[in-house]
Image (cartoon, rainbow, N blue to C red):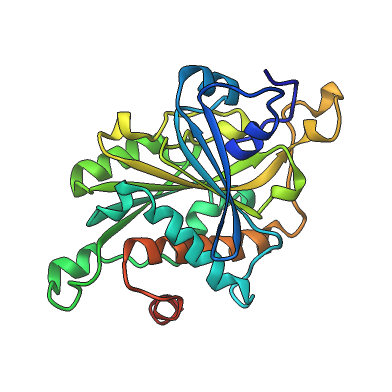
Amino acid sequence: MQRFYARTDLAAEASARLDTTVEGVKTEELTVRGCKVSKVEITSPAGAEAIGKPEGKYLTIEMEEYVNRRAVSFSDCANALAELLSSFNAVSSAKSFVIACLGNRAVTPDAVGPATADSLIVTRHLKASLPDEFAAFSSVAVVRTGVLGTTGIESAQAVLSMCELVQPDCVIAVDALASGEVGRLCRNIQICDTGISPGSGVGNDRAAINAEYLKRPVIAVGLPTVVDASAFTQDEAAKGLFVTPRNIDELVKSVSKLLAYGINLAVHSGMSVEDVDMLVE
């Protein structure tokens, strides 16, 4: 079905590589709030094998330029992300959430989760102590899982423990991804209902964070921050190497802010970007 290509976590990228039409793979191009969105639905085992992704729905916002908080396009992209998240019934029908922010803050390309956590509106404790004042908000708890090498605990186990304590209606997992195309780095945001396997993008697969494991819906939000070196060369020495932009610290900070705003708008209905500004800035 597919020729050799550099590793990618993006279903939109993987589907574009198919040489032929595959039964069980449906693709569609959409526009949401002026943002280009690629939709891929995998509906059969054959489709999953061809794409290399589990069966489910994958939505990818493809931003034409890097977006920071001061950019005019920030509001449109944040609202587009919120609308796409809310298009999943698991999000739109939920009243309580655990947001699992995966990754390692000490490794900049892997710091998307921790950086996103910094701008999330956390309300579980406030709704418990001030129920009337925070009645309009959903219950949100955030877990920064860290990584196995520094915590000794699998990210999936940490999230499961949090879910057993909090009993959320839905889990939103945020993580960094890998792409096979330089132009997608920090410019694509993938949302899917199949969960996520931490480290899979760089060949370091850990236990999956998905509905089967957590016994509740899991929506994954991912941002590609590294590209497989195989995209540039077939040299054997390049195997296992990943490349990231030289200004990755600035990009991760900016786009993680966008991820946080989009998630805030989706889980706390009725809010605006300006409302989020007042609560997180």
In-front residue for pair 60/228:
60
| For residue 272, above or below residue 141 | below
| For residue 142, above or below residue 200 | below
| For residue 180, above or below residue 102 | above
Give the residue displayed 83% in from the left and 25% down from the top: 237
Give the residue displayed 29% in from the left and 47% down from the top: 170
Does residue 47 appear in this view?
Answer: yes
Q: Is residue 159 left or right of residue 204?
A: left
Give the residue displayed 39% in from the left and 79% down from the top: 275
Does residue 10 appear in this view?
Answer: no
Give the residue displayed 25% in from the left and 69% down from the top: 137
In-front residue for pair 271/254:
271
Residue 252's spot in the image, x, y percent?
62, 58
Q: Is residue 130 left or right of residue 17?
A: left
Residue 177's spot in the image, x, y percent?
59, 42
Q: Is residue 108 left or right of residue 268?
A: right
Residue 74's spot in the image, x, y percent?
58, 71
Q: Quadrant of the N terminus?
A: top right
| For residue 121, above or below residue 208 | below
In-front residue for pair 164/267:
267
User: Looking at the image, how many numbered discs can be counted on the residues?
Assistant: 0
Residue 51's spot in the image, x, y percent?
58, 26
